[in-house]
Amino acid sequence: MSASLEDTTGWLPLDGLEPGFDANRGPHSTALAGREVEVVLDAGVRIRHVFDADRVRWELDTDALGARTGEDPYQAFEVDEELYYVQFQHEHDPREAVSLVLDLRHGRALAVLSRIGPAGQRPTVVTQRFDPGVIEGIEPTGTPPGPSTDLLGRRVLWTYSPEHRYEHVYLTENWYTFVCLSGPEQGLADTDACATYRIRPGIYVFAWREKVVPCAAVTVADHRLFRSHGALFGLGEDGTNISHFTFGAHGRLLSNTIHPEPS
């Protein structure tokens, strides 16, 4: 392998990737406007959310922290009937971003907190915490969100714009490989840490944390229709400014590997 391929110092920074990456983003949904949604996480945290058309007021109450309140702009995407993906960045602490999956049909929720650490933090600059929970006032039904191995062995082509095309190979519960097939990162590939949570049959939260570019992503991917919605969050080229943007993609299943049982 040539030295140029091994050298990652010239990789495109996150803020350099953003232009045009959101071409296939779905429309912002205002279906939550006027609603109050109180989420009770399994970890014991209770968070009340009050939505208007484009901002969410929230109040977090725990025995350890007491009450914390805030208000942030948000984007919401309708993933399936009565299933919403909400993304926002805290104005009081821009180094935190929240991804919230709300299943209003089954009374289930999954909260993902992404946090930017110091620029030199290892193994990844951005960390992620996954907290399943229930929605107050809706009788929980079905299976709660939880880690899943359903995607293992799949190779999927995700198209984020006419220019940006990436192949994902889901290797294990904790690792996946991406290959950029076209776009400004064409030819780049890496294997990064990831997590997969099953939300509904065929619908998953797939999140990853990159080690070369200081960023992380959360996506909600419908593998029945191969449609995804997501956000990237991390540090820009200068290592100080924060980049946070939503996107969407259309997918295509390329292959599905089934490993034989050991003989």
Image: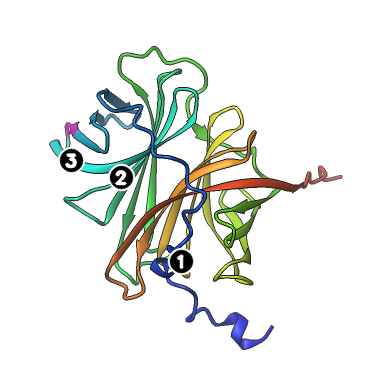
Q: Position of residue 247 (x, y in %)?
A: 46, 50
Q: Describe residue 163's horizontal placement relative to residue 62 as left or right.
A: right
Camera-near label (1 vs 2) is 1
Residue type, label 2: Phe
* Secondary structure state at the residue bearing disc 3: strand
Please report the bounds of the magenta region as a residue range.
59-63
Instruction: Give the Cα separation between the discs numbered 3 and 2.
Output: 10 Å
Residue type, label 3: Glu
* Secondary structure state at the residue bearing disc 2: strand
The picture quadrant where one finds residue 139 is top left
**Considering only order in the chain, which callout, 2 or 3, is on the residue closer to the N terminus?**
3
- Image: 46 above or below 226: above
Question: For the point 36% across and 14% down, which residue is it?
Answer: 138
Q: Describe residue 236's horizontal placement relative to residue 196 as left or right.
A: left
For mark 1, what is the residue?
Answer: 17
Q: Are marks 1 and 3 in contact (CB under 8 Å)?
A: no
Instruction: Give the Cα separation between the discs numbered 1 and 2.
Output: 20 Å
Q: Position of residue 68 (x, y in %)?
A: 14, 38
- Numbered circle sitting on residue 71: 3
For mark 2, what is the residue?
Answer: 88
- Numbered circle sitting on residue 51: none
Residue type, label 1: Leu
Instruction: Give the Cα separation between the discs numbered 1 and 3.
Output: 28 Å
**Is residue 53 found inside the magenta-colored segment of the image?**
no
- Image: 198 above or below 259: above
